[in-house]
Image (cartoon, helix red, strand yellow):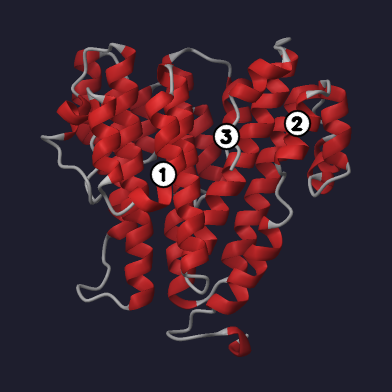
Amino acid sequence: MSTRTNGSGSNYEYVTARVRSRRAKLFDEDDYRKLIRMGPGEIARFMEESEYEEAMNALGARYSGVDLIEHALHRNLANHFDDLLRFAEGRLYDYIARYLRQFDAWNVKTVMRGIYSDAERESVETDLIRAGEFSEQRIERLLGAESIEAVIDVLADTMFGDALAGAYGEYEERAVLVPLENAVDRAFYEALIAGLPSEPSRATQLYIDFLEAEIDFRNIENALRLSRSGADVDPAEYYIDGGRLFDEEGIGALVANTDELVSRLRESTYGDDLDAALSELESAEGLSGVERALNRALLEYSRTLSNRYPLSVCPVFAYVLAKMREVDNVRAIARGKEAGLDPETIEEELVMV
């Protein structure tokens, strides 16, 4: 293993080479357009002839149809991200492990939403992604929780525990999940940057740069979602500290005007890299169009950083985002076909970069 190390015990050359190989296997626009014109059964067969073959075969006896497709997508994603941790060494391992905790955050919010909406356990479990640090035992305890308070008890000894406990009173008062979901997101992003050196190395600074960009885009997306939904909630309540572009006081006023927001982004450090995506954001109609434009912008920016700094954590994180987007796209296609949507409507929902 020592032959794969590079500075501080981190093996960037080895891991980024593996990531490039795997990124090359992601579905492209031609694949998506083929999938859009298939029925669920044809989609399943297409996946059986791709890198999803192992997951499809392993789960075929337990699930069928779109449920099989979704479970196979999530298992394959988890396996790939487990491999990243298995490949990585030193501080690079720590960076990746921290970043993959987003799936713990995803699973916590998914379970809380299921309880809040009184969903069946099976439908909640289908949406879980086992790619974070939570053990199977903890996930089973979360799935067995019958109340939001019970979920918080299960998470008391995790990085989400204090934040959720602090937000529970507001949840009870308002009877909406916003305070709890916001607490989960904030806890995740705080943990990403906690304990880093006060004078970071070049490798650590690139890690920080990538996360600051993601936090900026999450803040934009969250605030736009609220402002366009008409909900009587202050966008600042969704604000996540740690980005570069916004502060808690100014973000609400900025997102109320999309033209002003785009102008601010064009003048920012992201402007030159996001020209096409920002033009799309200006012309996007409706909340879903804006969100897709922002997701595409983040993917494009992550790829820019990946190309600019090929021997860093940036290609790894860019691959994680791209793989997650592939899973979201294929799932949207499968669910859209199941619902009888036409190909044009389904394609509008995809984010392809």
Front in this rendered view, residue 168 or 87: 87
Comes first in the chain, label 2 or label 1? 2
- The crowd level at tag 2 (other Cα within 10 Å; few <14, some 14-19, many 20+) is some
Q: Position of residue 237 (x, y in %)?
A: 20, 29
Viewer-nearest of discs 2 and 1: 1
At numbered mark 2, what does the secondary structure look like: helix, strand or loop? Answer: helix
Query: What amino acid does circle 1 point to?
Result: Asp
Using the image, determine if residue 88 lies above or below residue 36.
Answer: below
Comes first in the chain, label 3 or label 1? 1
Extreme residue in the bottom direction: 3
Query: What amino acid does circle 3 point to?
Result: Val
* Label 2, label 3: how far apart the Cα atoms are: 12 Å
Q: Which residue is tagged 2? A: 33
Comes first in the chain, label 2 or label 3? 2
Whether residue 335 is visible to the viewer of this picture, yes or no, is yes
Q: Which residue is tagged 1? A: 275
Using the image, determine if residue 95 lies above or below residue 197.
Answer: above
- Is residue 185 toward the left or the right of residue 233 in the image? right
At numbered mark 1, what does the secondary structure look like: helix, strand or loop? Answer: helix
Q: Which residue is tagged 3? A: 351
Can you tell which quarter of the image residue 8 is in? bottom left
At 15% across and 37% down in the image, what residue appears? 248
Front in this rendered view, residue 20 or 163: 20
Mark 2 vs 3: CB contact within 8 A: no
Query: What amino acid does circle 2 point to?
Result: Arg
Using the image, determine if residue 35 lies above or below residue 132.
Answer: above
- Residue 166's tag is none
Can you tell which quarter of the image residue 85 is in? bottom right
At numbered mark 3, what does the secondary structure look like: helix, strand or loop? Answer: loop
- The crowd level at tag 1 (other Cα within 10 Å; few <14, some 14-19, many 20+) is some
Mark 2 vs 1: CB contact within 8 A: no
